[in-house]
Image (cartoon, rainbow, N blue to C red):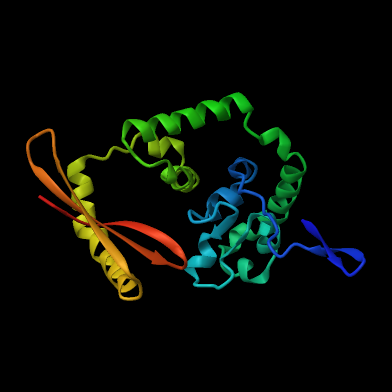
Amino acid sequence: MKKTVRKGKKVIETQDTNPSYTEFNVGIFNKHKHFKDYFIVDPKDTTLFICTPCKTSDLSNSSGQYDYIDRHIGADFHFISIPKDDLKDIPEALKAFKEFRKNKKIELIDPETEKKIRIEYTNFLIQHQLPFSLAPEIVKFNQYLLTKYGANSISVTGLSNTTCGQISRQCISKNIKEEIYSDLKKSVFSLSFDESADRLGPVFLCTHVRYIKENQIQHKLLALQE
């Protein structure tokens, strides 16, 4: 994208310092197995890809803009990160990406379906009394799960309150709390408390914290006590 600026009596064009990039189109996974096997959408930014073998090799070039995924595939560091048997697939993968981008309009969702999906998301937020500000993050997370595990795996995976609690206490809570506590040392913060009762009887006290990180307001669940 370009922008125009006035310099004296002249109007000149300059390159935009914040160019817009293409959203990762997951339809590419159906075009060649190389993309499905080795790439996922970055859950933090859907214009970015993550190359899983390059990330496993701890390479600094393991991520990049979806627009330039072909450059990544053709790079030497990608060659040495994937199994030798799959090197022969690279020319076909590059060709598939080029053709896919050329005909990408065919892959776009139709407006009516897109409208219905947005209504489903909105209904979910309303029914569960969630803030609309969570919508972008929920959409990105769904896209991340779909690209990493596939619709079939997600459709047969169940999750209960008990399992969530166990995972939170045993796997996630410690690392997340350490990260939050580290952030709180660098920022002013406020706490809020919310008491609610489960349908089976127990009463829970939720502790939420609000603080600033990288010039953005963060809302985090700090503790859940019965």
The answer to whether 97 appears left or right of 5 in the picture is: left
Residue 1, quarter of picture: bottom right
Which residue extends farthest left?
Answer: 201
Residue 77, position as x, y percentages in the image = 62, 71
Instruction: Tell me what residue is drawn at x 62 percent, y 32 percent.
Output: 109
Q: Nearer the viewer, residue 69 or 11?
A: 11
- Relative to residue 206, is residue 79 depicted above or below? below
Instruction: Tell me what residue is drawn at x 31 percent, y 73 percent.
Output: 182
The answer to whether 77 appears left or right of 94 in the picture is: left
Residue 78, position as x, y percentages in the image = 62, 66
Q: Nearer the viewer, residue 135 or 175?
A: 135
Which residue extends farthest front?
Answer: 9
Instruction: Tell me what residue is drawn at x 38 percent, y 35 percent.
Output: 125
Q: How many marks?
A: 0
Residue 68, quarter of picture: bottom right
Residue 21, position as x, y percentages in the image = 67, 54
The answer to whether 28 appears left or right of 95 in the picture is: left
Residue 166, position as x, y percentages in the image = 18, 51
Q: Nearer the viewer, residue 154 or 44?
A: 44
Q: Nearer the viewer, residue 51 or 212?
A: 212
Residue 67, quarter of picture: bottom right
